[in-house]
Amino acid sequence: WCFLFYRFSSIRIFRRQMTIYIVDLEAVDTRYTKEWKEHLPKQLKRATNQNVITISGGDTPQATTPGAFLNFGGTNVYKSAQMEKIGTMFCEGKVKDGDYFLYTDAWNPTVLQLKYMSELLNVKIKIGGMWHAGSYDPQDFLGRLIGDADWVRNTERAMFDVFDHNFFATEFHINMFTEVFKDTGKYLGLNPGPKEKISRVGWPMEYMEPTLSLYKNMDKKDVILFPHRMAPEKQPAIFNDLKQAMPQYEFVACQEKALSKNEYHNLLGSAKMIFSANLQETLGISWYEGALLDVIPMVPDRLSYSEMAIPEFAYPSIWTEDWQNYLANKKKLIAKIEDYMDNYKKYIPLIYKQKDKLKETFFSGNQLYGVISNG
């Protein structure tokens, strides 16, 4: 029995040894992708005690396509360079059974080529992908400009099937994804896949609190921030109209200022409130950054906000459902903003409560690391 126990334990220990390859998203200095490039390998190695290697695609244009998260041309240059590196690794026999490939953006077609090589070369790896958006979201660029074209939906379905673990940050995002792919007509009755292929995990952002501590306890000013992309699904026109209606406060659309990360964090640390009228949000990072710096989040009760926000900071969704509903409820919005701004100190304990909920459930990588460790 001792021999069998030792043999079984040895097998388990052997199987847990792996190299985790991070196939990352290109780093844009003003986005969290730059922070992930620095912090995620350290956090993942510390949590799993495994060898962690980042597969980078090199340098890409820093200027994103207007209103977008990345550069639509540059991102394909980056991914092509990643694919060349992955292919070379297989040619040289560096990828071994039990290794894990983590795609920090699941919408990366190179995963299809990765699967092709691992299957034909009989290298037994595991693959995980972190979903941020796609054509299944009507407010995303893919959803708006391409929609349900067969090529994009079939590509997303294929990538989902390739991933052993499909990671989502919120239940809202999972439900949106699975609702689209359950179509029994055009997509031949294919479901998104077995439930065990889907994991609701926190995004690996535990680095954020110590990083932002430098900007905490700054003097607060009557500043209201719009920290989102200047894109239709973020409804910046509502923010600009409120700015005209409430000259007693300073309204700042951050992306219009071309701020460095340090400048943005200084502005965030001195602000009292963040405003959102978003029609697309599968997570939302800026309002967590704000909560860490004692900034009131004012968000609509829809999208991912509904499961993430405490009631005191979620206003009725209909108030900003569209421009017409905004105009009909503009006075209510103004009254709510005035209450937040003029009674800011009253809301500080609630900001702490909101921060704790976000930190523990949505902005910690512990669940993600656990799935990867278990293979």
Image (cartoon, grey):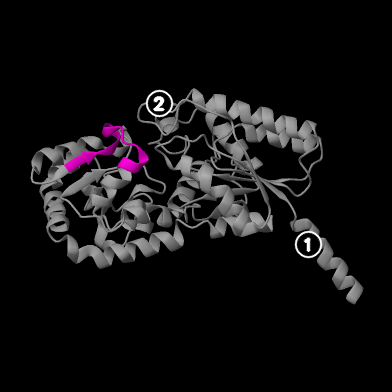
Give the foreground label among 2 and 1: 1
Across and down, in percent, residue 48 comes to 64, 58
Which of the 4 image quadrants contains residue 82?
top right
Residue 150 visible from this viewpoint: no
Q: Please state which amino acid type lies under the numbered disc 2.
A: Thr
| Marking on residue 173 | none
Give the mark nearest the N terminus, 2 or 1.
Answer: 1
Q: Is 263 left, or right, of 334 in this rendering?
A: right
* Towards the viewer: 256 or 129: 256
Q: Please state which amino acid type lies under the numbered disc 1.
A: Ile
Magenta-highlighted residues: 251-263
Q: Is 364 left, or right, of 341 in this rendering?
A: right
Residue at 13% x, 52% y is 332
* Towards the viewer: 265 or 282: 265
Of helix, strand and loop, which one carries label 2?
loop
Across and down, in percent, residue 43 comes to 56, 54
Q: Quadrant of the C terminus?
A: bottom right
Image: 219 above or below 28: below
Residue linked to disc 2 = 65
* Residue 8 painted magenta: no
- Decide: few, some or many residues near mark 1? Use Cα within 10 Å; few <14, some 14-19, many ≥20: few
Across and down, in percent, residue 307 comes to 38, 58
Residue at 8% x, 42% y is 247
Q: Are marks 2 and 1 in contact (CB under 8 Å)?
A: no
Across and down, in percent, residue 295 comes to 26, 55
Q: Distance between the Cα atoms at labels 2 and 1? A: 46 Å
Q: How many marks?
A: 2
| Marking on residue 13 | 1
Of helix, strand and loop, which one carries label 1?
helix
Q: Quadrant of the N terminus?
A: bottom right
* Residue 257 painted magenta: yes
Image: 345 above or below 237: below
